[in-house]
Image: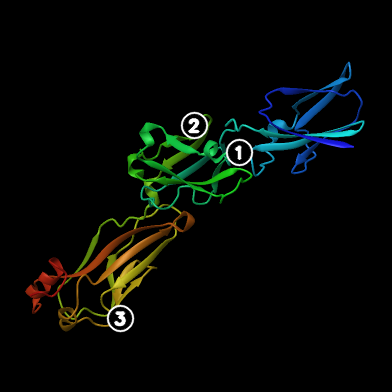
């Protein structure tokens, strides 16, 4: 049996027709490289008479899925058309370039998110800290799957969208991006109002919208009513025991506030039950002359979402009246000026 090979490189837009000078075709089949059971190609032989047969080769129902769904390593569809007739085997090798038309729009993993955040949200913590957010594009070529993001002009300086590709080389099942939404300027949003922020994912030809519904609640922040707390004494030593001065931060209803005290003296104690300081021994003038001021810094913390803490600080001083305390002038300078005994 004679064997004749023909190689053909085609775009295969619609169909291609081949006229073979033989009417006695006994076998005909299409084989793909790599092998596949899909119907990418349909070939129909039709005898024309006069010893000739027409073979019409055209795209099949699965042709449109070759790139987007099958994700071949190359955008070239290779297949063999084998014809067996009396005394000969004819094989035509086709290499068909398949065009990625950039017809796959970006897809968001979810359509919207809703958050209420305090006005002190850190710029490096994503708003969507507890909700993984992704966009994907199933176009075949990476250039057609490059997704950019844009916002309404009024939010461009307030919100930033950061995307990170999740694929590494090759042709992935889809081009997926991990998306983080950063809040740069929470104070530029009117508090107490739900702001609907539209984020548009675009691959140049196709777009898909995502909605972020964001409310700023300034009450989420713990706040000391004053930065500096002073307790006035008019005699020394200061006796052991609790000081009649409440040092407590305001916080949202239901919040759990943790207090951390950084004392500059080892005899100062903070009671979280009464929100008052106390001394565990008598405090003398000698103690005060050898110490730095303020006596303590106190930090109030409300544990926020995703490990984000909201904090405020205050400082605690002793203040002395002029009533008969030796060294008052030196101590008062230390308290009210630079915080050190620089008399």
Q: Quadrant of residue 191?
A: top left
Pointers 2 and 3 in contact (C-beta within 8 Å):
no
SS at circle 1:
loop
Q: Are marks 2 and 1 in contact (CB under 8 Å)?
A: no
Query: Which mark's residue is nearer the viewer, 2 or 1?
Result: 1
Say which quarter of the image contains residue 107: top right
In screen coordinates, is 134 left or right of 38?
left
- Spatial CA distance of label 3 from label 1 is 73 Å
Residue labelled with disc 1: 140
Position of the C terminus, as image quadrant, is: bottom left
Q: Nearer the viewer, residue 198 or 97?
A: 97
Rendered view: 117 above or below 143: below
Residue pointed to by mark 2: 204
Which of the marked residues, 2 or 1, is nearer the chain's N terminus?
1
Give the label on residue 280, or none.
3
Side of 43 where 105 appears, left or right: left
Instruction: Please tell me the numbered disc located at residue 106.
Output: none
Q: CA distance from mark 2 to mark 3?
A: 70 Å
Instruction: Estimate the x, y position of residue 186 in percent, counting from the top left.
Output: 36, 44
Q: How many numbered discs, if any?
A: 3
Q: Is residue 115 above or below residue 49?
A: below
Q: Residue at x 86, y 20 (%)?
A: 52
Q: Please rate how many residues cluster around mark 2, counting C-alpha atoms within 10 Å: few if below 14, some from 14 to 19, many from 20.
A: few
């Amino acid at each position: 049996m004679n064997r004749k090979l023909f190689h053909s490189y085609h775009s295969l837009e619609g169909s291609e027709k081949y006229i073979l000078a033989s009417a006695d075709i006994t076998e005909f089949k299409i084989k793909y490289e790599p092998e596949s059971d899909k119907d990418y190609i349909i070939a129909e032989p039709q005898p024309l008479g006069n010893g000739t047969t027409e073979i019409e080769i055209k795209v099949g129902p699965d042709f449109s899925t070759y790139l987007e769904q099958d994700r071949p390593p190359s955008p070239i569809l290779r297949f063999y058309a084998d014809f067996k007739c009396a005394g000969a085997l004819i094989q035509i090798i086709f290499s068909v370039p398949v065009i990625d038309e950039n017809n796959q729009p970006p897809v968001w993993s979810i359509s919207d998110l809703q958050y209420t955040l305090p006005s002190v949200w850190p710029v490096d913590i994503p708003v969507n800290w507890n909700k993984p957010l992704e966009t994907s594009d199933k176009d075949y070529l990476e250039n057609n799957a490059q997704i950019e993001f844009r916002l309404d002009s009024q939010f461009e300086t307030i919100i930033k969208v950061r995307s990170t590709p999740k694929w590494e080389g090759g042709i992935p099942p889809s081009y997926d991006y991990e998306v983080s939404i950063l809040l740069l300027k929470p104070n530029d949003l009117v508090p107490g109002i739900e702001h609907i922020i539209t984020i548009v994912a675009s691959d140049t030809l196709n777009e898909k919208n995502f909605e972020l519904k964001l409310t700023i609640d300034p009450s989420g922040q713990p706040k000391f009513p004053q930065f500096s707390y002073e307790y006035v004494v008019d005699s020394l030593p200061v006796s052991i025991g609790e000081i009649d001065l409440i040092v407590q931060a305001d916080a949202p209803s239901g919040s759990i506030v943790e207090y951390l005290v950084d004392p500059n003296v080892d005899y100062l104690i903070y009671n979280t039950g009464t929100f008052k300081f106390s001394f565990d021994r008598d405090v003398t003038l000698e103690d005060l002359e050898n110490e730095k001021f303020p006596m303590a810094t106190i930090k109030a913390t409300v544990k926020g979402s995703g490990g984000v803490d909201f904090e405020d600080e205050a400082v605690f001083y002793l203040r002395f009246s002029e009533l008969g305390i030796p060294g008052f002038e030196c101590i008062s300078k230390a308290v009210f000026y630079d915080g050190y005994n620089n008399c």
